[in-house]
Amino acid sequence: MTQPYRLSTGGRIDRSRTLTFSFDGKHYTGHPGDTLASALLANGVHLVGRSFKYHRPRGILTAGGEEPNALVGVGRDDAHFTPNLRATQVELYDGLTSESQNRSPSLMRDYGAVNDVFWRFFPAGFYYKTFMWPRKAWTKFFEPRIREMAGLGRSPKTADAARYAQRFAHCDVLVVGAGPAGLAAALAAAKTGARVILCDEQSEPGGSLLAEPEAMIDGLAAAEWLKAALVQLAAYPQVKILPRTIAFGYFPHNMIGLAQSLTDHDGEWDDSKPRGRLWQVRAKQVVIAAGAIERPLVFPDNDRPGIMLAEAARIYLERYGVLPGRRALVFTANDVAYRTALALHRAGCAIAGIVDLRPDAGGPLVTAAQKAGLPVFPASTIAGTDGRLRVTGATIKPIAGGSGQHVSCDVLLMSGGFTPSVHLFSQSRGKLVFDSTLDAFLPGAPAEACSVAGSAAGLQSLKEVLDSGAAAGGGAASYQVANAPLAQGGFIGAVPYHGDPGSVRAFLDYQNDVTAKDVVLALREGMRSVEHVKRFTTNGMATDQGKLSNMNALGIMAPVLNKPVPAIGTTTFRMPYTPVPFGYFGGYARGELFEPERRTAIHSWAAAQGAVFEDVSLWKRARYFPRGTEDMRQAVARECRAVRNGVGIFDASTLGKIEVVGPDAAEFLNRMYINAWTKLQPGKLRYGILLREDGFVIDDGVIGRISDTRFHVTTTTGGAARVLTMMEDYLQTEFPELDVWLTSTTEQYAVIAVQGPMAREVVQPLVEGADISAEAMPHMSMVECRIAGVPARLFRVSFTGELGFEINVPADYGRAVWEDLMESGRPYGITPYGTETMHVLRAEKGYIIVGQETDGTVTPDDVGYAGMIGKAKPDFVGKRALARAAFAAQTNRKQLVGLLTDDPAHVLEEGAHIVADPAQPKPMTMLGHVTSSYWSDALGRSIALALLRDGRARTGEQLYVPLENGNARVTVVSSVFYDPEGVRLNG
Amino acid sequence: MKLLPPRSPIKGSQEMLLIPCPYCGNRPEIEFAYGGEAHVVRAAAPRTVDDTAWTEFLYFRKNPRGDHAERWRHAYGCGRFFNVKRNTYTDQIEASYRIGETLP
Amino acid sequence: MDNLVQTKPMPRLFPLSGKAIDRRCTPVNGGARFSLRLPAASISTASAALGVELAVPVNRASAANGRTALRLGPDEWLLLLSEAEAVPVAAVLEARLTDGRYSLADISHRQTGVVLEGTAVTDILNGGCPLDFDLAAFPVGMATRTIFCKAEAVLWRQSEGRFHLEVWRSFAPYVWNLLAIVSREYAV
């Protein structure tokens, strides 16, 4: 027989369609509208998991997001698999495949259950006190074993195949929770014309109304009222209803994070559609109508499969048409459990008894139960339960003492009352206030523009709930409600059970296997703060964050500490409210869209030539252009030779460029750069060094003066944005009196460097409107002209030490001009070269790269550039810092030098340290480090640049670079290895 | 005050605050770059400032728990630097005002 | 005149060419773009010179005579012109703003644009842009610099369902690909 516990009528499921699903390899059936939990219960399956630490058999405890036990893995294959899902929230679809967790080999026979036999040896704090030594055993033995034994689901090994979406949204009123309070709030807000977003974690809006057969609202049955309310809301174009959407986090200034599940329920596994969407909603007003969570009672062996919350059992009955069992025992401190008993009784479930902790329970539900002939045990408790894989019975005892009475049952339904869901309110930093009549923390003064409505605010009657929602939504509706139950009564702490406390375990935190005794032990060990108790016992630290256990823990602590609950306080509520898959946070940012990949206008040409690219900040830059079977070293050597002996062509488009314009442009640059700019004539270039205010080099670049009032500033590739921001900072906040404006032109121009003795021959034929002869256009000059028919800024500049030009053309024309230059250069063997060759060539000349020769602690003098400082300038950024006595007192600063290895073939490791005596004891005295190191084709040997203590005075000294495979002896030399007179530059 | 490394132009979307730009109105934090403590004045003639004062200017900041006058730049907006009075504990912003104006 | 692009025979290349996402997204071809920076004292003279009112509120567009100025900040305008107007506009500003207290920088090739049009356009934009596109918050005629995922962007609302989006050229493939992915969620 399939679904033996499914009723033939009732509930919101579609019995006309049957769905097949599997759990741990076994096949079952259910219906659309089911959750995995309700379908399992319809098939009589309560045992769904093993507990975290003791591997105790566990059953479905709740019907919602607070579920601590029924954690399952769901998926089609490893690329479509999510562990740790709550079966109570997994919507059923045809073909759903699910598995239990933390058991081996199976749920029925789990070897880990040996932990349960020896439970006395695993109290709270056990981990902290054991496994202390030997030290290595922790990583090699204990930790892997513990991880294997304790834990949640398995992580998939394959990358997640699903896509995830993101969405920013704004609204006037965000309503969290679409139960009666949330609906009333949304209706009231919508009527005022407000933009409303109403979200709810369940598959359909309605909340408690989805399992409400009796109550009447404004003359309509609750289900009818719900239907009408949704029709009404749908008519407002400015109202958005988001089902399957968890409000997981409340962030400053009314930003709420929502995780909307889009496809998990359809079973189609269509990877072209996003699986979920992360919403970042900015709301003018937030209404938290998150409801309340029923509390378990803490009594001995309260965790056997078949023991569940009373209201959850009623939801399975009313919403899913499922009988949780055939013979129910109810244990309660709250009236609504009587309602569960009555409903089950009507549906044909025997009621073994209603055990009420209260001596004087009264009210209509209690009376109705008595009238129906259900056995009620007032002022009584449950002293223990039995059954291994399913509860089979329990012992009822009067609280006053006396002999117990054993009754048999196949489900035990408990209710300790309701805990308002104040999680989001607390995340918003709103103050919580303890209400001693409700034994609950309630929302107090808000810190953000938000209000709390319904049972989340501790309201107990449906009318109050609806009216509070309407008020929160800005309305004044007064709802007429009849036949609604009142959820009065509750209990926090561990119930009395009259037994040997040493021999029983009453579970408090199901997911982390924390018992009432663990909390008492923590207090005995000296923990006093609730935060300390939480960490010692791990109570409330599982993925459910103590939704079921926090209040009971406080109820246990209060009498031991002899303090009222509010004096103990509560732990901090943190996001996410329920776990959110990581993919939601990644959103669109994955694969090639993880971040922008910037390409120059010439990229496509280089790619077609087979260039190998490297990442430089967000740019892709051609590193070298291998020919045939060349490796990098061979290709770079050939490219270097071409530049030194003929001509090379290089894409320098990624250099940062800033147009500095205005009457005060030169004065502004005077104040920013160390160099003097006033006397630089239009048409001339100068190499500029930029410091931070602390005197250290932060950027460099060639700056051209286009006219009296216009400069073309270049920066390093990685420094472009940083330098512009820094300049804007000074301009706006320190020098607002200057008439000068900055515009980034990095992407306006493609920049083509043509370098080598033949460079002029290549460029010349393409130039219109300028004389670029050596006489008319010396090194460090510039001209505006046309090149290959395109307006250009032509710089005569060199970062190679050879005669060279840098051609700036509007980016759209970059590739065309490049190709014309290649054509023009063909007779001279023009050779494209990449960043690696550029690095070698500049290192041969001792030109620094900011960020390689400098590291944020290097002054201009350290790299030998003190001579560039404009001596007459009263001020520039960093000048005052360099004048500090602290600098003057330093006589052994690290300075830029060259290094030559004894073995000319040895190319040193960049970053390697330099010492005077390699035989000295460790730790050695470091004199400096290698900043750049290459094979130099021009010199036929290796070269290196280094920052070395008092380096310039050490020229000629022999030092050592200790490396893994021995010590390399090096000689300190000048940092300029090639053409030290600079003859070639001026060719 | 210029020592703070400016934030990378590439950011995730994790910023939460709603910041009132004096030129553009309320905008999400993701459009802004933080600029450190406000009203740290660079002397007009740094030469005349002694080492102690200059070191103070370079390296010492208040870092209060509570009200803080701080600089922001509407980097992905009007591009302007401006000042904000923000409570560093509650994150509530009490005022925003232009460079050159005094803390209200 | 400085760095201005003059009329030339060569075709412009666009990172966008042939890469329209769907009917709702079309590239803005050609056109000259300038970043114009002015102190408050120069605004009225510059307005008269351009024939476009520049003294509009920050984050508003102003258009006249086929010329458009998007006021992106208190002292910053993005000028959108036909290519033929690039040289005359630069010349007239130079002639009229005789004290030289302004900055005009050619950024025609720095950025590229698309026009997004359709009923779901604000949903698509909100896939990466954090702004509120309610007409009360972002009315027709509003233009502002903002962010789309990890790229800087300028957005100009031309009508309720029509936006002009400008990004720097090397960010364009990233933004267009994202727009393509987001727009699939809101298929027409």
Image: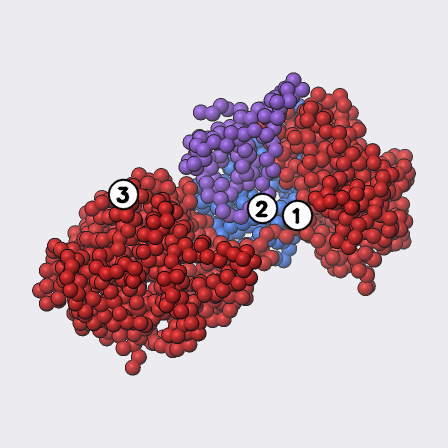
Colour representing chain B: purple
Secondary structure under the numbered disc 1 in the rendered image: loop
Q: What residue is shown with label 1?
A: A617
Residue drawn 34% across the image and 71% down it: A47
Q: What residue is shown with label 3?
A: A563
> Marks 1 and 2: same chain?
no
Residue A943 vs residue A668, the one in the foreground: A943
The amino acid beneath tag 1 is Ser
Residue A816 x/y as whole percent: 76, 51
The amino acid beneath tag 2 is Ile
Residue drawn 53% across the image and 24% down it: B100
User: Which quarter of the rendered picture does the N terminus of chain A lie within?
Assistant: bottom left
Residue drawn 73% across the image and 40% down it: A925
Question: Please, which chain is the residue tagged with disc 3 on?
Answer: A
Colour representing chain C: blue
Q: How crowded is mark 1: few (under 14 residues within 10 Å), some or many (20 or more)?
A: few
Colour representing chain A: red
The amino acid beneath tag 3 is Lys
Q: Looking at this rendering, what residue extends furthest in the left direction? A: A371
